Amino acid sequence: MNYRILGRTGIRVSEIGLGCEGFVMGDDAFARQAFARAFEAGINCMDLYSPNPDAQRRVAQAMKGRRSDFVLQAHLCAIWSNGQYKATREIGQVKAGFETMMKNLETDYLDVGMFHYIDSPERWLEIQNGPVMAYARDLKAAGRIRSIGLSCHNPEVGIMAAESGDVDVIMFSVNPCYDLLPGDEDCDLLFDKDSYQGQFTNMDPQRQRFYETCQRLGVAITVMKAFGGGDLLDARLSPAGVALTPVQCLHYALTRPAVASVMSGVRTMEDLERTLAYVTASEEEKDYATAFASFPRIRWEGHCMYCGHCAPCPMGIDVATVTKFLNLVRAQGSIPETVREHYAALKHKAGDCVGCGQCETRCPFGVSIRENMKQAARLFGR
C-alpha cells in the first residue's frame, strides 16, 4: 500500500480508503471480515458519512486498539431521525448529532469533521457565515476534530470552500465522466444519461480549476464515486460507452492534482478484493489512456491527463509532474511559493529537455509536451 499526506493537515493516509456503504448495508460479520482484510492490506482511513448507529458501532469495534493509527473522516450535518438518515443545517440538531456520533464511535476526536453534502453556493455561504462553521471551529480548537472538511459534487462550491481558508479537506466525486460536466447544484445530473448525449472535448474548465486550486492551497481531496456507482465498470451503463476496470478508475482519480485517497464503497468482499488489486497492479493494468482514446463520444485533445504515457524521458524528466506544476502556475497567474519549492526539489528540470520529441510520439492526447517544457523552463528559470 502506498501512502500520501492529506494536504496541509500533515495526516498520512493510504491511497485506498474505505467508504461506509457496505457497513450500513451489511451485518456485523461482514464488517469484521472486511475491516480485517482492509487492515491486513494496509488501509488506514475511511469516510463515514452515514449517521446509521449500527454502522457507527461497527466502526467503533474496528477501531478498538488502533484508534491512533486509523484516520477517520466523518460528517457533521448528517443525523439519524426516526430510523432514517437526514441532512440538517439546524445547529441544535447538528450538535446533538455530533455528540451521538462520538458516543457511538467511542472516540473523543475525528481526524476530519466534514460538512455534509454542500452542493450550492448559497448553502456554502450559509454554512461559512453561520453557526455551523462557528461550531466546527470550536470543535477544532478543542481538539475534537483535527481538521475541517466538506463533501460536495459541485466544483464551484469546492473552489469557494478551498479559498475560504477554513476547509482543509474536500470529499469530491471524481471520475473521467463526471469531469466532463459543468458544475451544478443538482448532483443528479451527474448520473443522468441525458447529460452525456453530446460530444465532449476534454475536462470541464471549472473542474480543472478546482483540482488546481486545491493543489495550490494544500487542500486535500478525498474521492467518492470513483466508479460512478458502478456504471463505469459496465459498457452498457457507462456514459463513455466503454467499460473501465476498477484499477483504471482508481488510477485516474489518484492522478488528479491534490487527491490523497479514494474512499471505495465496497459492499462485498469481492468488491474489496477488486479494489485492493490496485495495490499490486502493473502500469499496464493502471493505464486508462488507451481506454480514453476509444471513448466514442469523448475526445481528449491537447490536454495532459497525467497518465504517464510520455515516460520514460531520456533526460530523466518527470514530464507529468512538471506539467502539473506548469498548469498550477497558469491557473494562478503567478508562481506560488509552494509550487516553486516543489519544482526546485525535482531532480531533473524542464530546462533539461533536449527536444527529442520521444514523449510526444507516445502521448495519446496530442499534448505539445516540448512547448510545455519550454514554457516551464522560462517560468521557473531552469
Image (cartoon, grey):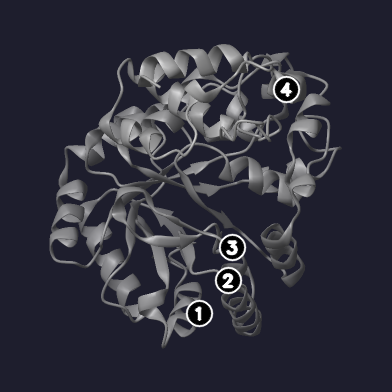
Name the element at disc 1: helix
Q: How far apart are marks 3 and 4 (CA)?
A: 45 Å
Tell me whether circle 2 and circle 3 mark residues in contact (CB < 8 Å): yes
- Alpha-carbon neighbours of circle 3 within 10 Å: few (<14), some, or many (≥20)? some
Tell me whether circle 2 and circle 1 mark residues in contact (CB < 8 Å): yes
User: Which one is nearer the viewer's eye here, 370 or 3?
Assistant: 370
User: Which label sits on residue 58?
Assistant: 1
User: Which label sits on residue 358?
Assistant: 4
Q: Where is residue 192 in the image (x, y as percent from the top left)?
A: 67, 31
Residue at image position (53%, 16%) is 372
Q: Position of residue 132 (x, y in %)?
A: 21, 49
Left-right relation of 324 to 165: right
Q: Which amino acid does label 2 sit on?
A: Phe
Pointer 3 residue: 21
User: Which one is nearer the viewer's eye here, 113 or 219?
Assistant: 219
Q: Quadrant of residue 9?
A: bottom left
**1 or 4: tag closer to the N-terminus:** 1
Is residue 324 positioned above or below 68 on the image? above
> Which one is in front in this view, the residue at disc 3 or the one at disc 4?
4
Name the element at disc 2: helix
Q: Position of residue 51 (x, y in %)?
A: 43, 65
Q: What residue type is labelled 4?
A: Gln
Q: How far apart are marks 2 and 3 (CA)?
A: 5 Å
Tell me whether circle 1 and circle 3 mark residues in contact (CB < 8 Å): no
User: Can the viewer see residue 305?
Assistant: yes
- Alpha-carbon neighbours of circle 2 within 10 Å: few (<14), some, or many (≥20)? many
Residue at image position (22%, 39%) is 165
